[in-house]
Image (spheres, grey):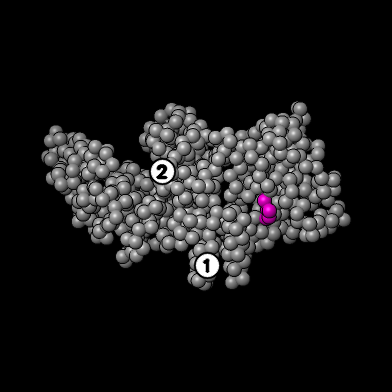
Amino acid sequence: MHGTPAYCFPAMQLRIQTEPEMNISPLRLLVNRTIRTLCPALLMLPVACSESGLTIRVIDPLTNVLPGIVYPPAGDDTVRVARGENAVLQFVISADDSVAAMTPVLRSLKTEQGTSLDKAVLGWVRNVQASHAYVPAAPDALQSPSGEYPDPILTDTTVSIAAGGTALLWLDIPIPADAEAGLYEGSVRISGLKNGKRIVADRQFTIQVYPVTLPEQSLLVTNWYFPDKFSFMNDNESVEDDSPAYWECMRRLVETASAYGQNVWLLYETGTPVPTADGKGLTFDFSRMDKTIEFLLRHADVRLIEANHFAKRSRNGWTDPFWANVPVPDGKGSYVYQRLPHDDPRVQRYIAAYFPALQEHLRSRMIDDGSGRSWLDIYTQHIADEPLNENKTSWEGLARQVKQAAPDIRIIEAYRSSSYDPALIDILVPQLDEFVWEIYRTMPAGHSCWFYTCMYPRGNFANRYVTLPLIKTRLLHWINYKYDSPGYLHWGFNAWGANGDPFGDVSAPANDWPGGDSHIVYPGYRKLYPSIRLAAMRDGIRDYDLLKMVEARDSIRAQAFVNAIIFDFDRYDTSVSRFRQIRREILDFLEDMH
């Protein structure tokens, strides 16, 4: 953002922006508050300190701030939120001279009565490359002059900027469910070194917390995670399964994902086969699987477990039939895994032995929350990923055997065939561009229809690539609401390494992956960094609950709100200012009904 002007205000106006009110005289305090009331435009302008040479502007956090492009400050930088969601602000800092080791701090955030909010995440937003020019491209795809796009939020580093350069700061404040409603005034202070001397600059902001309390999250959300990528969280050294390092990485991953709205968890572990005494059959040891489920129940919000697929395409061709990967006794007291067709007697014997044992084991383990539910109540099973019309018969052959062996185990699948048998699948998850099909408009009793996105759909469909406007990521969950879809799935939470460095080129041309499709978090040593896309997704998840609250009071009004933004599966109003207007109307409506 070269060429950004450094604005200077008269000294008194600067102090309005930079001095904490506890240190201001009563007369000046009265002047400050009068100016805020009568001249709010002052707070929308860039805020600069003539001594520091830093300019701090508030930019709506749904704006992707691309390097080399100057953006106008937010027209209204008051953040309006309900209790139980997050208030997010984005600051663009520019300098008239080079500044080193910049560090941010939230100085204060309180109401006029003194009630404060003191928990916040502050981080510098880093740019990443996205080189893959996927097709068909979105008509509103972002065009970065440098090929770089903002995404990871680094919460444990300082930043330096050159003269005329910029830095992007992210402030994320969780609003407790019991927070006092009202207007909170706060300030962020940026300190750094300029010509070896410490400088500081402040920027004030306001958050309006409505007397509206969000309920517990109701949308079901899963991002598939990959423990085989934990080496990226371990200085590129391998992480052995079930080791202390493995569980530390798991804890970091699960806690991060849970904090951003994930409540459905992929389960890789299965019952370990144990040959019978005669070496001709198998029993099963569920202890390793149990350890993971117990871990998830301790460390995350767990609404569902989704057990991983046990079948794949026979030769990995897209239309090939599905073959199951099953343990087969070798007659010598052990077993070997083989990939076999669904009608092979060895597959049939395995399914007939394994799934009844699994069902009864899950039924015997209780969730320790006083609900009286067992693990079976939260367990779902994948068969094979993305069945098509061409290979649906083999998928159904496997699913039918599972249902016959264990009728109480629900089946979930990312499903791409144009028809389905409701006796064989309980949770259908079509791709968003196929979610438009009429077969998904009405679900049989006891069934539900989610949707997923991945490297597709493209064109104008909402997705969560780094090259798409952030509002399209947030609107994914407005689509959930509009089309009565209670869940969302994405395959790529942390599939790092397609191009080596997860912070480098986040697309993968060889795999036809658009930028950001493979991961929405970034690795540090035994930690994870969130992204601005993950924050937008989390906030969209909570928008879903706001719309549900409106629906409970006035279903027609709820539809009017969502219809003002979502016109069709791939047509939306992506104006950020219009979105903020509708969000404000939703909060005002709920406040009036309070």
For the point 58% across and 44% down, which residue is it? 64
Does the magenta-highlighted stretch encompass residue 75?
yes
- Is label 2 in a helix, a strand or a loop? loop
Location of residue 370 with respect to 342 vertically, above or below: below
Of residue 51 and residue 285, the one placed in the foreground of this image is: 51
- Residue 15: x and y in percent read 81, 47
For the magenta stretch, what is the residue range? 74-78
Quarter of the rendering containing residue 411: bottom left
Q: Name the residue under label 1.
A: 560
Q: Quadrant of the C terminus?
A: bottom right
User: How far apart are the alpha carbons under marks 2 and 1?
Assistant: 31 Å
Q: Can residue 364 be seen in this view?
A: no
The disc label shown at residue 455, or none: 2
Q: Earlier in the sequence, mark 2 or mark 1?
A: 2
Location of residue 542 with respect to 557 vertically, above or below: above
- Left/right of residue 541 with respect to residue 285 in the rendered view: right
- Residue 251: x and y in percent read 46, 42
